Image (cartoon, rainbow, N blue to C red):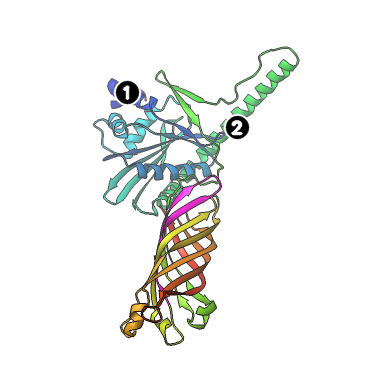
């Protein structure tokens, strides 16, 4: 920095506040193994440039950054503070609220840490949109390598938009990442040789205590006299997408109704568009989904009589499904639903006696199996085959007992689902 003194250096209270904030920060390491780490370490900082922090946006941005960085062969540390607004205010002071200025302040602040790179995501929420500036910086050289800005609506496709933007940020930095990886590989090889030499001496009786700590359970750095520890988490494969579990699932689809049994002689091929929403619960061996479903069954009767008054049925019920874990693009599930259906057909031409004896409320149930193919993190296509049954009630004559009859058939469905 030479003789230049920044606002941050001049502000002792700011330095103290930021140090306390850093002490209270939580770091998460995403690539731990029993072998010496040879991947460059990238520190991720997601901070608001204006306005209050947005927890949902912060999670999306940090997950997207980690996904792209780990694909590029790095390990990541997530810098999270208890008060992001206070940190940004102390770092920038009276300086303009710009991502580049914030990145330079962070470079100065983190200069004592033994990490290779920094990625800053400085964001500003504007109504239903977000403006994000991504900056890739070299902590060892103290310079900004690349920057990309992206404006996007806050919707289901936000994570894809951010992943695309980070993908455009990394190419200028690939050379430095590769150079840092080679350096770490050389350091790891040198450390392994030292361990082997100590082990040989110990076996020969020349040294009793020859174990070298190639890798500790807790990674420790020192900055400004404050010890900051990084808490390890399970290893993530470089090509594995790091993302949050999405508990809500919604879908809209279409299916033909293929009548069977008695209904086969009464109804022709019919149609059954539907929608459903469910809350997903992640278990050890699968995912349990519980929700509601509804739709419209459109029947075409091939004969006159009571069957012709079952033209439109609106089912509404509870939907339950058990699916495989979200570990691959292809998944399988079993589902069932139970509830009631409302006959909303026109009864005006039905005789008065028959109109009073024919129920407009039917019981219904269905069950079947299917599979799903994920298009992205939160959108996919599913197909299933259900066996569906409706039970309607009627009286053949006034004062007679209630009788039942069935409408049954197979429902092969295809639908688009989304998760949030």
* Residue 67 placement (x, y as % from top left): 48, 44
Q: Is residue 19 left or right of residue 282?
A: left
Q: Main secondary structure of the magenta part?
A: strand
| Vertical order, 290 against 197 (above or below) | below
First in sequence: mark 2 vs mark 1: 1
State the extent of the magenta-drawn residues as a range: 277-298
| Vertical order, 411 against 109 (above or below) | below
Does 392 lie within the magenta span?
A: no
- Residue 275 placement: quadrant: bottom left
Which of 234 and 76 lies nearest the eye of the viewer? 234
* Residue 350 placement (x, y as % from top left): 34, 84
Residue 202 circle label: none
Q: Which residue is mark 2?
A: 185
Q: Residue furthest front?
A: 399
Residue 15 circle label: 1
Q: Is residue 16 left or right of residue 223?
A: left
Tally of numbered tags = 2
Labels 2, 1: front one: 1
Quadrant of image for the N terminus: top left
At label 1, counting other C-alpha atoms closer than 10 Å, the crowd grade (few under 14, some 14-19, many 20 or more) is some
User: Residue drawn 73% across and 19% down?
Assistant: 200
């Amino acid at each position: 920095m030479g003789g230049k003194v920044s606002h941050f250096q001049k502000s002792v209270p700011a330095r103290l506040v930021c140090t306390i904030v850093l002490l209270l920060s939580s770091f998460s390491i995403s690539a731990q193994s029993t072998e010496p780490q040879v991947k460059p370490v990238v520190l991720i900082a997601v901070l608001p440039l204006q306005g209050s922090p947005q927890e949902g946006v912060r999670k999306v941005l940090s997950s997207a950054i980690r996904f792209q960085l780990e694909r590029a062969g790095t390990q990541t540390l997530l810098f999270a503070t208890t008060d992001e607004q206070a940190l940004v205010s102390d770092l920038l002071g009276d300086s303009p609220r710009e991502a580049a200025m914030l990145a330079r302040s962070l470079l100065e602040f983190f200069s004592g840490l033994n990490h290779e790179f920094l990625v800053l995501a400085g964001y500003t929420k504007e109504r239903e949109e977000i403006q994000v500036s991504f900056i890739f910086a070299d902590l060892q050289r103290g310079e900004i390598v690349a920057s990309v800005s992206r404006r996007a609506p806050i919707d289901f496709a936000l994570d894809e938009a951010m992943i695309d933007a980070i993908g455009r940020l990394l190419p200028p930095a690939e050379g430095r990442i590769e150079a840092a990886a080679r350096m770490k590989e050389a350091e790891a090889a040198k450390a392994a040789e030292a361990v082997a030499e100590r082990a040989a001496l110990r076996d020969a009786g020349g040294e009793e205590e020859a174990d070298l700590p190639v890798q500790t359970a807790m990674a420790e750095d020192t900055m400004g006299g404050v010890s900051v520890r990084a808490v390890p988490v399970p290893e993530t494969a470089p090509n594995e997408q790091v993302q949050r579990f999405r508990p809500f699932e919604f879908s809209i689809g279409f299916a033909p109704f293929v009548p069977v049994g008695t209904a086969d002689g009464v109804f022709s091929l019919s149609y059954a568009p539907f929608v459903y929403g469910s809350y997903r619960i992640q278990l050890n061996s699968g995912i349990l989904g519980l929700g509601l479903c509804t739709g419209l069954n459109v029947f075409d009767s091939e004969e006159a009589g009571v069957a012709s008054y079952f033209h439109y049925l609106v089912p509404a019920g509870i939907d339950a499904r058990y699916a495989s874990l979200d570990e691959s693009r292809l998944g399988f599930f079993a589902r069932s639903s139970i509830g009631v259906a409302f006959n909303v057909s026109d009864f005006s031409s039905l005789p008065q006696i028959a109109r009073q004896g024919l129920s407009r409320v039917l019981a219904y149930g269905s069950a079947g199996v299917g599979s799903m193919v994920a298009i992205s993190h939160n959108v996919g296509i599913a197909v299933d085959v259900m066996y569906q049954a409706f039970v309607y009630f009627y009286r053949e004559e006034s004062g007679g007992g209630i009788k039942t009859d069935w409408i049954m058939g197979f429902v092969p469905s295809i639908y688009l689902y989304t998760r949030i």
